[in-house]
Amino acid sequence: MATKVFDRDTLLDLTVNFVPLFILLFFIVGYAVYDPFGIDSMARNLQYVLLTAPFVLLSILTYLSGKAISTAEKSDPVYMPGGATVDDAEPIEEHEE
């Protein structure tokens, strides 16, 4: 069976990126359905570029950061919350390579 790239903890970490993605998607769809600013094609094109560029870039950033978080959780030692900064802290779980 294939392993999941994003487990539950990784998705919770990425929630801060999902909220702006949904907001941008709402405005992209909303402006496609209803045009409140008239029919000027230059302004409409600029409007879509200013909405879709951050959406695409944030989507890529979210995917790459999710993959990095998932990889780090699988390969690095796991400490108690706040325990990684304590001197002589022992990891709860060690991952072998």
Image (cartoon, rainbow, N blue to C red):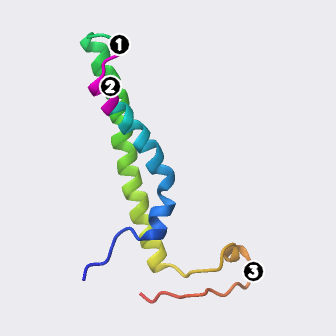
Q: Which three-letter amino acid code belongs to the residue tagged 3?
A: Asp
The quadrant of the rendering that contains the C terminus is bottom left
In this view, the residue in front, 57 or 36, is 36
| Left or right of residue 72: residue 31 | left
Q: Which three-letter amino acid code belongs to the residue tagged 2?
A: Tyr
Give residue 6's position: percent from left, percent from top: 38, 67
What residue appears at the point 35 percent right and 15 percent down from the top-left corner? 36
Q: On screen, 1 above or below 25?
A: below
What residue appears at the point 27 percent right and 21 percent down from the top-left corner? 45
What residue appears at the point 37 percent right and 56 percent down from the top-left corner? 63
- Alpha carbon of mark 2 to alpha carbon of mark 1: how far? 9 Å
Which residue is tagged 2?
Answer: 31
Q: Earlier in the sequence, mark 2 or mark 3?
A: 2
Q: On screen, 4 above or below 39?
A: below
**In the rendered structure, which segment of residues is drawn in magenta?**
29-36
In this view, the residue in front, 69 or 39, is 39
* Element on which disc 2 rests: helix
Q: Which mark is residue 37?
A: 1
Q: Which three-letter amino acid code belongs to the residue tagged 1?
A: Phe
| Left or right of residue 49: residue 58 | right
Which residue is tagged 3?
Answer: 87
- Alpha carbon of mark 1 to alpha carbon of mark 3: how far? 60 Å
Q: Are marks 1 and 3 in contact (CB under 8 Å)?
A: no
